[in-house]
Image: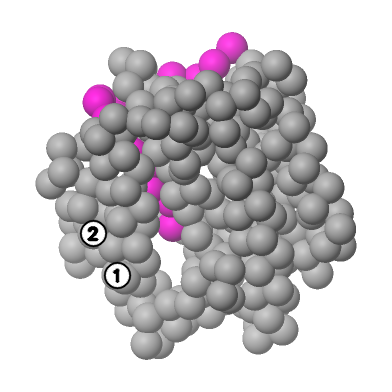
Amino acid sequence: MAPIVINTQEEIAAMRRGGKILADVLARVAAMVAPGADAAVLNTEAERIIAAHGATPLFLGYQPEGAASPYPAALCVSINDEVVHAIPYEGKVIRDGDVVSLDLGVRYEGMCVDSALTVAAGGVPARTQKLIAVTNKALYEGIAAVRAGAKLGDVGHAIQLCVEREGFSVVRELAGHGVGHHAHEEPMILNFGKKGTGEALVAGMTIAIEPMVTAGDWRIKTDKDGWGIRTMDGSLAAHFEHTVLVTEEGCEILTGLEA
């Protein structure tokens, strides 16, 4: 296991700047989600805005250990039963009633930040609206549990409780993670757990909290392209994520528009 990284004030300041760029890009791309929009066009626009800010797409060309090929885009566009990491192929057109998750990372001044959100395209049933709202709420419940001295299990427990009391399921095979010098660092931050268990958080750590939630069963499978991950039972999924800085008093969201 790699050691936990405690970032310097200069590195944290760079992540704040990168986080503001990421928030701007993600908000502008999310505003383009509508019936008839092509996922590849969303990706092209994300790449354009990132470049205009002088930043670099974090996911483009990313190839973690075990991956057969590098990720071919800047943006992940996961629709309906796709949970995460779905490639924005040309011709992947968003339809009325689709649930669309956008996951994006940028590197700026040598530091990485990561964020995600889910939006509905057109009209969706109340249950689908609730899935999206509960997943977003779970993100902030998890963030509220972050502070120096808190345990990883505190964060996972807060997310799990928020999700399961509303009748939804937390994906258990995927997790949040440390982020900073690299896209994925220690520690792994599960979206379920017991309070008071796991590693203690330390001020200066930067971590990505990201609940991935399904309307049905939590089990998942990987697409033939080796990237897209979807629910095994075909149920809808939602995904929200922020990069946060652990502080003595709590935490600071680095990827909010107000960062």
Q: Report helix, strand or loop for mark 2.
A: helix
Q: Three-letter amino acid code at disc 1?
A: Ala
In this view of the protein, which residue sits in the foreground, 8 or 209?
Answer: 209
Q: Quadrant of residue 99?
A: top left
Residue 180 % position (x, y) = 64, 64
Q: Quadrant of residue 213?
A: top left
Q: Three-letter amino acid code at disc 2?
A: Ala
Q: Is residue 150 above or below residue 83?
A: below
Identity of the residue drawn at 71% across and 64% down: 21
Q: Is residue 253 left or right of residue 213?
A: right
Q: Which residue is mark 1?
A: 145
Stretch in magenta: 209-224
Residue at the left extreme, as displayed: 165
Distance in Å between CA atoms under marks 2 and 1? 7 Å
In this view of the protein, which residue sits in the foreground, 246 or 186?
Answer: 246
Question: Crowdedness of circle 2 by 10 Å Cα count: few (<14), some, many (20+)?
Answer: many
Q: Quadrant of residue 194?
A: bottom left
Q: Report helix, strand or loop for mark 1.
A: loop
Identity of the residue drawn at 15% across and 37% down: 167
Identity of the residue drawn at 75% across and 32% down: 41
Q: Earlier in the sequence, mark 2 or mark 1?
A: 1
CB under 8 Å between discs 2 and 1: yes
Residue 242 % position (x, y) = 50, 60
Is 220 included in the stretch rendered in magenta?
A: yes
